[in-house]
Image: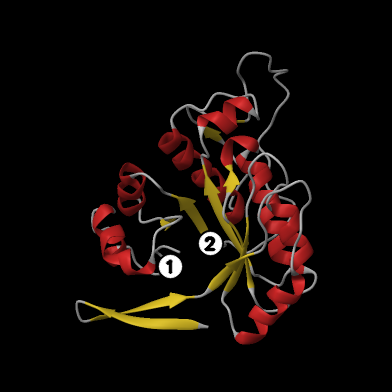
Amino acid sequence: MQITHKDEGKELIMKLGLMASGFGPQIRIDMARIKEAEALGYDSVWTAEAWGNDAITPLAWIAAQTSKIKLGTAIMQMPARTPAMCAMQALTVDQLSGGRMIVGLGPSGPQVIEGWHGVAYGKPLKRTREYIAIMREIFRREKPVEFQGEYYQMPYKGPGSSGLGKPLRSILHGRIDIPIYTATISPQGRRDGGRSRRRIHPGVDHAERARDIRAASGGGFPQGGRGQGFR
């Protein structure tokens, strides 16, 4: 299901999605509501994580009980899992669901990352660029993955290393174009997404503010080519 809207003479398409669950002492997923949304033609259903339930496990649960609706994470916390683990999870759900996975990533915030996960928050934009570069290389499977960045090194050769690590290529063959969206609340994050021709997830913004989001991206999306944009 989608809604069309004209802005400055251009036809924009807004696809409808829904959140699968909130946060609380128990995780509750209203499968009847999700199945009804799928029957009505909704584009996607999304899961999230904070410091309780994770995002990917509920998505697999939903995937097993649906057949058409796309499955997205909004969002998976990048510092909570390595890029390789995130790629593994995405490839797995994508295969099991028949190619319906949408990866939504974000740096979260220092309160959660340092307080809950116990790792340094660091530079979110730099981490995001490295993270996505590694994931895309894993998806492509062109060669064993080698990467040397500020946050991620593959193979790891830093302090505490055994020296036995070697470049590896994913055993699982998957879709190389699994969509990756990044959470972008700050203006700097939106500009970076626009410059990088990257899909973004602007979070709590309203559809009526699409023009403002494009402007904040520095005009990157209209020239970004196929598959670029925001949800």
Considering every residue shown, the one lying at the far top of the view is: 159
Find residue 67 and report its image quarter. bottom right
Please identify the quarter of the rendering in which residue 146 is found: top right
Q: Is residue 30 above or below residue 77?
A: below
Quote the CA–CA distance across marks 2 and 1: 8 Å
SS under mark 2: loop
Residue positioned most to the front: 25
Q: Secondary structure at mark 1?
A: loop
Q: Amino acid at mark 2?
A: Pro
Residue drawn at (51%, 75%) of the image: 16
Name the quadrant of the C terminus. Answer: bottom left
Label 1 crowd bin: few (<14), some (14–19), many (20+), radius 10 Å: few
Instruction: Tell whether label 1 touches label 2 (CB within 8 Å).
Output: yes
- Locate residue 6, reporting x and y percent: 28, 81
Q: Which residue is mark 1?
A: 227
Counting from the top left corner in percent of width and height, residue 53 is at 73, 46
Q: Residue at x 40, y 55 (%)?
A: 198
User: Residue, x 48% and y 35% (percent of image)?
Assistant: 127
Is residue 144 shown left or right of residue 124? right
Q: Classify 10 Å Cα crowding around label 2: few (below 14), some (14-19), many (20 and above).
A: some
Whether residue 215 appears in this view of the structure is yes
Q: Earlier in the sequence, mark 2 or mark 1?
A: 2
Model colouring: secondary structure
27 vs 129, nearest the viewer: 27
| Residue lying at the far left of the rendered structure | 8
Front one among 210 and 170: 210
Task: Point out which mark residue 179 bears.
Answer: 2
Residue 68's place in the image compared with 160, above or below, is below
**Residue 227: percent from left, percent from top:** 43, 67
Residue kind at label 1, given as amino acid type: Gly
